[in-house]
Image (tube, grey):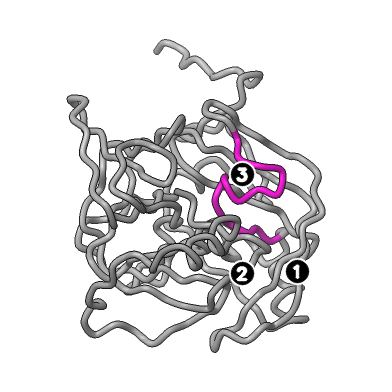
Amino acid sequence: MFRRLLTVLAVLLTAPALAGVSAASAAPADDYSGIVKLSNCSGSLVRLPQSGEFDRALVLTNGHCLESGMPEAGEVLVNQPVNRKMVLLGADGRELGRIRATKLVYATMTDTDVALYALDSSYREIARELGGHPLTLAASPADVGTPVSVVSGFFTRTWNCSIERVVYSVREAEWTWKDSIRYAPGCDTIHGTSGSPIVDQGSRQIVGVNNTGNDDGGVCTFNNPCEVDENGVVFARRGLTYGQQTYRIPACFAKNNQLNLTRDGCMLPKPAALPVPVPIPA
């Protein structure tokens, strides 16, 4: 799991990177527009389909990339004050400048592995002051066979492949994620790439966020995720790598990039204290 910096040094010193495989054919040129480098992970400057240029900008990464530590299974964090500095990259991978998050809008490792930060700047301010522009979160699920790029701000490196399978669930230690993306050969992501956006090469929209891979061939243990199907059948293989879909996010935001977990169609996990609305009978 957890392709973040906290384990990258140990991996580089004690073992080679995951077995390399051939890159996707006719891969697009690397493009780091909207890509973000965090202290321990990768991320991306993102907008929702309904976002406006004056809205506070959002950054997407993994829930396990929080500076405060990994959320427990079943834990959901919302609207917490933070002061986290990040680096925004330009199309050629060079640093455009620093950006600052002042709020952790949403984070969980339940059903998915995502964190969304709100910055102290709007999209318009970032465009004017730094020349940076966001990537858009797709509002529909990813399709098997779609060519994608996993773009790491931490390493300024891109992996190209396709979506090999949408897995019913992926389990790792205490956490379980649903509708996970398994990469085809080519996206042998390494530690430090956690939080990298999974970008549809055709639309340039984000369809997921990179988060884990099986290091040693273990089954459902830390750093060794397994697949569990609808019938409870477990499968694991060393070198398989995964990301989590992000199409559930847009429906949980209202105008001005405001999180609203009670909106119709919002399927993100909710904090225990937040009541789940009961549909009114017709």
How far is the residue under mark 2 from the one under mark 3? 24 Å
- Residue 141: image tag: none
Q: Which amino acid lies under the numbered mark 3 shown in the image of this protein? A: Ala
Measuring 21% from the left and 52% from the top, which residue is drawn there? 165
Q: Name the residue under label 2.
A: 36
Judged from the image, the secondary structure of the residue bearing numbered disc 2 is strand
Q: Which of marks 1 and 2 is nearer the N terminus?
A: 2
Q: Is residue 149 above or below residue 259?
A: below
Q: In which quarter of the image is residue 16?
A: bottom left
Which residue is under mark 3?
254
Is residue 49 visible in the rendered image? The answer is no
Rounded to the nearest whole Å, what is the CA distance between mark 1 and mark 3?
23 Å
Part of the protein shown in magenta: 57-71
**Where on the picture, by quarter, is residue 93?**
bottom right
Camera-side residue of 218 and 277: 218
The reply to whether the magenta stretch includes residue 107 is no
Residue type of the residue flagged with mark 1: Ile
Query: Which residue in the protein does label 1 denote?
Result: 99
CA distance for labels 1 and 2: 9 Å
Could you tell me if the residues under marks 1 and 2 are in contact, i.e. CB atoms within 8 Å?
yes
Relative to 125, 218 lies left or right: left
For marks 2 and 3 on the same chain, the one whose residue lies earlier in the sequence: 2
Q: Which of marks 1 and 3 is in front?
A: 1
Residue 187 position (above or below residue 65) = below
